[in-house]
Image: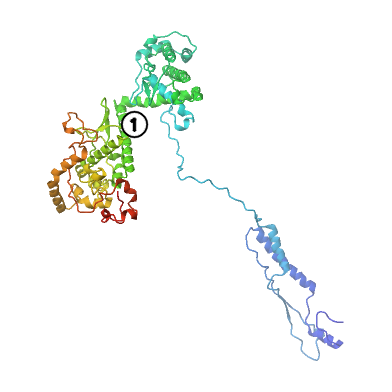
């Protein structure tokens, strides 16, 4: 019978000899048991690793250890012919380098116990965040109220624009129609009479009701409210208040029943005092009746807001017991302070309007950029003061502005005056310069303007740091005789249309010498030239002002004519030396926009000496 585990040889003797020489073979059952034991050990290691929560990459099955087993030879089968027993052999079981298929069981088991999260292939779009506007600023925390009666912007509904009429109504009742009007304290006799007649608020409400027919505590003719309303002489803004006779009788009757000769809240008491409550009831009640009579129709009153009594009371307390109370305290602390503040605001507002109108005129007529730069800051313009009963404003002199700069501004006023003659319907303010200059209260000079804008004496009184910080020490802006500025095209100065850099190169040494910015030798030479031509300068200035009008010196009035300055700014006159540089006198004001166009600057003779990177007026 063939041996399936060894080689077969024919003959029985050979078979016996073969069995005696072959080592013992491990049975398959034993081998299978050893393999299962190795696999079980590997599985146990994987389970312990998974139980410990360690994340690791799947690894190959641990290599099986070598199993060596010595098999003793069977002595009973020794061959007598050999006389020597065969050597013992080792049987080695070595697993393959690649893990057997059974070893994958451990990895499948590990994945089953700690499976990775499922991968969702669905694309989920993230919600887009709203883009913030570049102009959007972070929300500011509301300012803390200075008074419990104060109302802030967030406290007013959208319809508040119409309910501001109650402020006007309170002003009319109080007689505070001017911006500098100061509230007064009520008469002590009126206070005493009121508290003698009223002790409870419900009594006041009963008297103030429309259906009340209570007796009048004072004669109705003693009530001093709405005196000019019937005649239409109460002006509010650009409108006039017209109140019907029926409402005036009703309002005066209510005041007479309350004993008010004047409607005048007591700002020394709390807003909830009995007297102040009576004033509030009278004001709100008459306002509702007046709004119903359409006396304030031009104010676009919101009818629904008028009927909101709670909101009207809040508005009343805000205006009377916060805004007017602040004015009252300020005036008591310093007499006349409120009037000064109102005048200062009015002057500053007029100054802003003047600067805006001049800048608009210069931009429209395409003035040189150095002129535009000077006209831009508000501080470069003088302030004025209204002359009561004369119909014009008195110009005040800025302490930091040079006299040559003042001549330029007078020339600008003349140009604007002539332009306004072509539009008689346009409203304009008449400004005149007094023969005896009055200094302005504004002393803070604008920064960064050309050096010849500033007064030399004022400049020398500055500290060294201020001399470097305030003026532009490298540029000049005006002609040596600024009265020759802004003339018609046929009479225009040949250098006025030059570019800024070219103009500075021509006149810097001449105009900067009074400021000590030029070498001494140059100063002496320019001083000699100024002395030689000073007499002619006065004549030229006279030609530049107004040849057709009467001489201002011949007038007995204390003011010059509008736009004129006489010889007020002639004592520091700087005479032009004529210059030998190029001129742009033929260039028109309106051709400014073409200064960079080669078609306009290629073969034009006055442009030959001008640098290419400079604009031309």
For disc 1, the marked residue is 425
Residue pictured at 14% horizontal, 53% vertical: 521
**Side (left or right) of 63 relative to 451:** right
Question: Relative to 95, does residue 248 appear above or below in the rendering?
Answer: above
Q: Quadrant of the N terminus?
A: bottom right
Q: Residue 400, can we see it?
A: no
Nearest the viewer among 368 and 152 is: 368
Judge whether 515 appears above or below 182 on screen.
below
The image quarter in which residue 245 lies: top left
Residue 233 visible? The answer is yes
Q: Residue at x 41, y 23 (%)?
A: 168
How busy is the neighbourhood of tag 1: few (under 14 within 10 Å), some, or many (20 plus)? few
Residue 205 percent location from the top left of the image: 48, 15
Quarter of the image for residue 457 reads top left
Residue 214 lies, with reference to residue 595, above or below; the image says above
Q: Secondary structure at mark 1?
A: loop
Percent position (x, y) of residue 216? Answer: 42, 9
Viewer-side residue, 123 vs 375: 375
């Amino acid at each position: 019978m063939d041996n399936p585990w060894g080689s077969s040889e024919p003959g029985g003797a050979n078979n016996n000899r073969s069995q005696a020489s072959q080592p013992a073979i491990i049975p398959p059952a034993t081998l299978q048991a050893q393999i299962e034991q190795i696999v079980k050990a590997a599985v146990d290691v994987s389970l312990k690793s998974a139980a410990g929560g360690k994340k690791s990459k799947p690894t190959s099955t641990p290599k099986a250890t070598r199993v060596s087993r010595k098999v003793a030879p069977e002595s009973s089968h020794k061959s007598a012919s050999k006389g020597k027993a065969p050597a013992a052999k080792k049987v080695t079981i070595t697993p393959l380098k690649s893990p057997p298929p059974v070893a994958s069981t451990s990895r499948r088991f590990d994945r089953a116990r700690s499976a990775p999260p499922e991968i969702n292939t669905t694309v989920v779009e993230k919600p887009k965040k709203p883009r913030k506007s570049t102009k959007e600023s972070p929300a500011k925390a509301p300012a803390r109220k200075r008074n419990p009666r104060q109302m802030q912007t967030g406290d007013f509904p959208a319809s508040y624009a119409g309910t501001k009429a109650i402020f006007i109504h309170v002003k009319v009742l109080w007689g505070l129609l001017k911006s500098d009007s100061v509230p007064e304290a009520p008469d002590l006799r009126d206070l005493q009479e009121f508290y003698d007649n009223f002790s409870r608020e419900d009594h006041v409400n009963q008297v103030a009701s429309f259906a009340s027919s209570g007796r009048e505590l004072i004669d109705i003719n003693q009530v001093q409210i709405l005196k000019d309303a019937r005649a239409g002489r109460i002006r509010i803004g650009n409108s006039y208040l017209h109140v019907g006779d029926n409402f005036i009788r009703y309002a005066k009757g209510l005041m007479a029943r309350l004993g008010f000769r004047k409607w005048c809240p007591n700002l020394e008491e709390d807003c909830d005092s009995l007297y102040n409550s009576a004033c509030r009831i009278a004001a709100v009640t008459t306002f509702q009746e007046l709004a119903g009579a359409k006396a304030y129709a031009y104010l676009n009153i919101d009818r629904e807001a008028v009927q909101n009594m709670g909101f009207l009371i809040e508005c009343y307390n805000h205006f009377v017991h916060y805004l007017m109370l602040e004015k009252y305290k300020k005036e008591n602390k310093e007499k006349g302070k409120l009037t000064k503040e109102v005048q200062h605001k009015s002057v500053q507002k007029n100054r802003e309007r003047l600067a805006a109108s001049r800048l608009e005129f210069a931009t429209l007529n395409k003035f040189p950029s150095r002129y535009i730069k000077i006209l831009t800051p508000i501080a470069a313009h003088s302030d004025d003061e209204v002359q009561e009963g004369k119909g014009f404003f008195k110009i005040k002199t800025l302490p930091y502005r040079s006299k040559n700069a003042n001549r330029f501004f007078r020339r600008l006023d003349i140009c604007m005056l002539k332009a306004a003659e072509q539009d008689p319907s346009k409203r304009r303010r008449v400004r005149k310069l007094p023969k005896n200059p009055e200094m302005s209260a504004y002393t803070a000079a604008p920064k960064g303007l050309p050096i010849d804008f500033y007064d030399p004496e004022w400049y020398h009184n500055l500290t060294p740091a201020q001399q470097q910080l305030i003026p532009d020490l490298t540029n000049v802006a005006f002609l040596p005789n600024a009265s020759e500025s802004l003339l018609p095209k046929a009479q225009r100065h040949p250098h006025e249309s030059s570019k800024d850099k070219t103009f500075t190169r021509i006149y810097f040494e001449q105009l900067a010498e009074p400021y000590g910015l030029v070498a001494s030798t140059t100063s002496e030479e320019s001083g000699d030239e100024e002395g030689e031509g000073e007499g002619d300068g006065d004549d030229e200035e006279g030609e530049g002002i107004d040849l057709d009008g009467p001489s201002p010196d011949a007038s007995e009035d204390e003011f010059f004519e509008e736009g004129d300055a006489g010889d007020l700014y002639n004592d520091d006159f700087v005479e032009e030396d004529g210059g030998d540089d190029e001129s742009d006198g033929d260039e028109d004001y309106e051709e400014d926009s073409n200064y960079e166009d080669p078609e306009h600057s290629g073969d034009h003779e006055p442009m030959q000496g001008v640098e290419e990177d400079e604009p031309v007026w």
